[in-house]
Amino acid sequence: AISGSAVIAEASKYVGVPYVSGGSSPSGFDCSGFTSYVSGQLGISLPRSSGAYYNVGTVVSSPQPGDIIVSPGHVGIYAGPNLQIDSPRPGKSIQFRSIWQSNPTYVRVTG
């Protein structure tokens, strides 16, 4: 299994990369492009559509760093209590920020 700290370490490399609609590379990411790219760097293949994340891995009630946060229209990576790293929206860049989603689904994917 891939450790949560490895996922967070990989995701951290891209802090400051701009949001780009449909982006899936370090020149620019959208939310699922970022999440799938980070996972891919660790050998885990994940979807390019945020809605598809409801159907991968195992839903967990107590998330650990590295788990995926899924909410309607958005995915991010759980980074710790009330913290996520994600590619938020146009005009923003990848950043650690508070979990703003109400009642998100947490998904654990292991390699």
Image: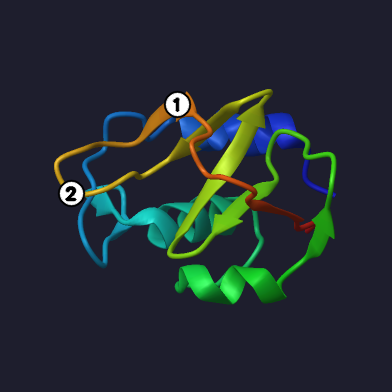
Q: Is residue 15 left or right of residue 53?
A: left
* Residue that numbered label 2 is attached to: 90
Residue at point 39%, 55% (across, down) = 31
Q: Quadrant of the C terminus?
A: bottom right
Residue 19 at x, y = what percent?
A: 24, 48
Q: Residues within 10 Å of mark 2 (few under 14, many from 20)?
A: few
> What amino acid type should be assigned to the residue bearing mark 1?
Phe
The color scheme shown is rainbow
Picture quadrant where residue 105 is located: bottom right
Q: Amino acid at mark 2?
A: Pro
Asked whether the residues under the numbered discs 1 and 2 touch, taking CB atoms below 8 Å apart as contact, a structural biologist would say: no
Q: Is 34 placed left or right of 28 in the picture?
A: right
Disc 2 is placed on an element classified as loop
Q: Residue at x 14, y 41 (%)?
A: 91
Q: Position of residue 36 (x, y in %)?
A: 51, 60
Pointer 1 residue? 96
Task: In the rendered view, tell whether residue 53 sits above or below residue 80.
Answer: below
- Residue 6 place in picture, x, y as percent: 67, 34
Whichever of callouts 1 and 2 sits on the residue coming sooner in the sequence is 2
